[in-house]
Image (tube, coloured by chain):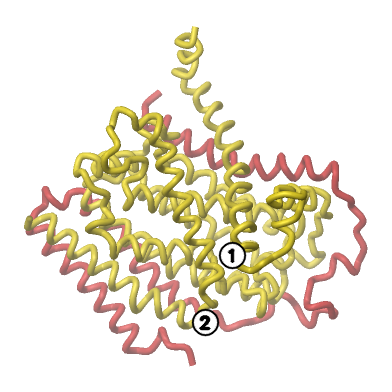
Chain colours: A yellow, B red
């Protein structure tokens, strides 16, 4: 019986439909889980009231209340705004987010589609949101939005490079760009790549934090100087989509970092036959550990200044990433 | 249908889902949310006072230099990836070639830093 049910998924179109349905449910779920983690941890670190007492216990009602609030907010588009561009911007940001899920390996064979250029594709599609952010900043016809959008563009392209170049180290070691191929190479090698790629891992995490425009790299939406940057004119659900994309991107960026450097769905010592079942759990554990660190950083570090941000990327991270590539290739060829 | 085509059809479908997700959720919300426009509400936000001048005012976009630098290094990244997969096969020759290539581009970065285009004054 089960066999015949599963046979239906051999059809490409049925499988595609199921995958789309799955990811459409997965993204709001991830947004809620990480959003809840964020408000709970923020409350813990800053003694905020709501997330402790909303709903009576554990603050479970806080996120639901937030969701209902967004549902009933009026959708305001300023008269001066460039309406078509204003409306397209959140879509473009979410397109990049959803498309990133295609190549994340949750377990052996548990991947939406194993593209042969996996990691290259992931890094390319993640920069799509840059265009969305710039569109949001420009179309709002607001000075804060424009400055925020330009800052975001400058920041995202500066940290795109360390992100891409840090990933090259793992690609050299694995000899493949396929995401599940990189995990399999780590299983064959018997150690996660972070042991030799700790420089690459560090650069990747710093750059990922900057790509997500999270504190300490949140100059594009610095509320003390730019109100809310490129998000200033957005309200209600359109506003929510940028946050959904941010939380989902925290997940995907952490998943990519875990896959490239921490062994993905595999842990040393776990027998490979059981990976189909424990694999997703291991990956999720690693992802949430990294996401926890990102939230933790948010309440630990003060915001950078704009020129410090650019200096860090161009004078430190990019040369360091290039040196890392050279050293990795040297050891791969010579040893 | 070839696997290649199926792969990128999946990518296309996922990308389309991003658009559909926004449209569906906005559609659902449009049933629930109020809609009472008035001129004050539709005004551009500028800390509570009426906006001064146009939103698209002229600014000095400092980031164009970074844009130029980015173009150079991003193309470099595109060249590095195919080499990265074949490092072992290409051996010492490939390694030296790539190091020369990277060195030339780093020279460009050093030049930009020496010219102080990355400094803010």
Please tell me which residue is depicted at 49% across the width and 55% down the height of the picture. A291
- Placement of the C terminus of chain A among the 4 image quadrants: bottom left
Chain ID at mark 2: A
Rate crowding at label 1 as few (under 14), some (14 to 19) or many (20 or more) other CA atoms within 10 Å: many
Residue at mark 2 to residue at mark 1: CA–CA distance: 20 Å
B48 up-or-down from A27: above or below? below
Mark 2 or 1, nearer chain start: 1
Farthest-out residue, bottom? B121
Element under label 1?
Answer: helix
Residue B33 is situated, as x and y percent measured from the top left of the image, at 85, 48
Mark whose residue sits in front, 2 or 1: 2
Q: Quadrant of residue A98?
A: top right
Do the residues marked 2 and 1 share a common chain? yes
- Disc 2 on helix, strand or loop? loop
Looking at this view, is B35 or A199 the one in front?
Answer: A199
Label placed on residue A74: none
Measuring from the top left, give residue A129's x and y in whole percent: 54, 57
Q: Is residue B115 left or right of residue A90?
A: left
Depicted A207 relative to depicted A222: above or below: above
Q: Are marks 2 and 1 in contact (CB under 8 Å)?
A: no
What residue lies at 57% left-to-right and 83% top-to-bottom?
B60
To which residue does mark 1 refer? A134
The residue lying toward the viewer, choosing from A48 and A163, is A48
- Asked whether residue A101 is in view, the answer is yes
Q: Quadrant of residue A151?
A: bottom right
Q: Return the residue found at the far front.
A: A57
User: Which mark is on residue A305?
Assistant: 2
Q: Is residue A93 in view from this perspective?
A: no
* Residue at (21, 73) in percent of width and height: B104
Q: Chain of mark 1?
A: A
Bin the neighbour count of mark 2 within 10 Å (Cα to Cα): few under 14, some 14-19, many 20 and up: few
x%, y% of residue A20?
56, 33
């Amino acid at each position: 019986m089960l066999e015949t049910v599963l046979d239906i998924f051999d059809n490409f179109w049925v499988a595609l439909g199921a995958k789309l349905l799955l990811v459409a449910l997965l993204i709001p779920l991830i947004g809620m889980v990480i959003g809840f983690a964020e408000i709970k941890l923020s409350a813990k670190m800053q003694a905020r009231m709501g997330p402790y007492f909303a709903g009576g216990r554990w603050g479970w009602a806080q996120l639901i209340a937030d969701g209902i609030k967004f549902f009933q907010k009026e959708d305001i588009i300023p008269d001066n705004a460039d309406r078509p561009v204003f409306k397209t911007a959140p879509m473009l940001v979410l397109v990049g987010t959803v498309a990133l899920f295609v190549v994340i390996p949750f377990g052996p064979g548990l991947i939406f589609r194993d593209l042969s250029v996996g990691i290259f594709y992931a890094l390319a599609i993640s920069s799509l949101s840059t265009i969305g952010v710039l569109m949001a900043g420009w179309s709002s016809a607001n000075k804060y939005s424009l400055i925020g959008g330009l800052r975001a563009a400058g920041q995202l392209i500066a940290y795109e490079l360390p992100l891409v170049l840090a990933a090259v180290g793992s690609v050299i070691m694995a000899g493949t760009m396929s995401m599940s191929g990189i995990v399999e190479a780590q299983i064959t090698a018997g150690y996660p790549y972070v042991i030799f790629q700790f420089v690459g891992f560090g650069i990747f995490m710093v750059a990922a934090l900057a790509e997500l425009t999270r504190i300490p790299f949140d100059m594009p939406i610095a509320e003390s100087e730019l109100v809310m940057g490129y998000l200033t004119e957005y309200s209600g659900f359109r506003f929510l989509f940028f946050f959904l994309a941010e939380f989902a991107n925290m997940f995907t960026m952490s998943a990519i970092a875990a896959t490239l450097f921490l062994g993905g769905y595999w842990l040393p010592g776990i027998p490979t036959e059981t990976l189909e079942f424990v694999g997703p759990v291991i990956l999720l554990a690693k992802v949430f550990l990294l996401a926890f660190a990102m939230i933790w950083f948010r309440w630990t570090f003060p915001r950078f200044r704009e020129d410090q941000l650019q200096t860090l990327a161009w004078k430190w991270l990019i040369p360091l990433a290039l040196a890392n590539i050279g050293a990795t290739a040297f050891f791969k060829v010579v040893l | 249908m070839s696997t290649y085509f199926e792969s990128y059809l999946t990518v296309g479908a996922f990308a389309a889902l991003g658009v559909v997700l926004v449209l569906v959720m906005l559609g659902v919300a449009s049933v629930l949310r109020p809609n009472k426009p008035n001129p004050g509400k539709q005004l551009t936000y500028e800390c509570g006072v009426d906006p001064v001048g146009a939103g698209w005012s002229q600014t000095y976009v400092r980031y164009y230099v970074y844009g130029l630098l980015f173009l150079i290094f991003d193309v470099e990244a595109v060249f590095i990836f195919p080499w990265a997969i074949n490092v072992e096969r290409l051996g010492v020759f490939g390694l030296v070639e790539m190091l020369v290539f990277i060195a030339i581009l780093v020279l460009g970065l050093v030049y930009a830093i020496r010219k102080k285009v990355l400094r803010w004054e």
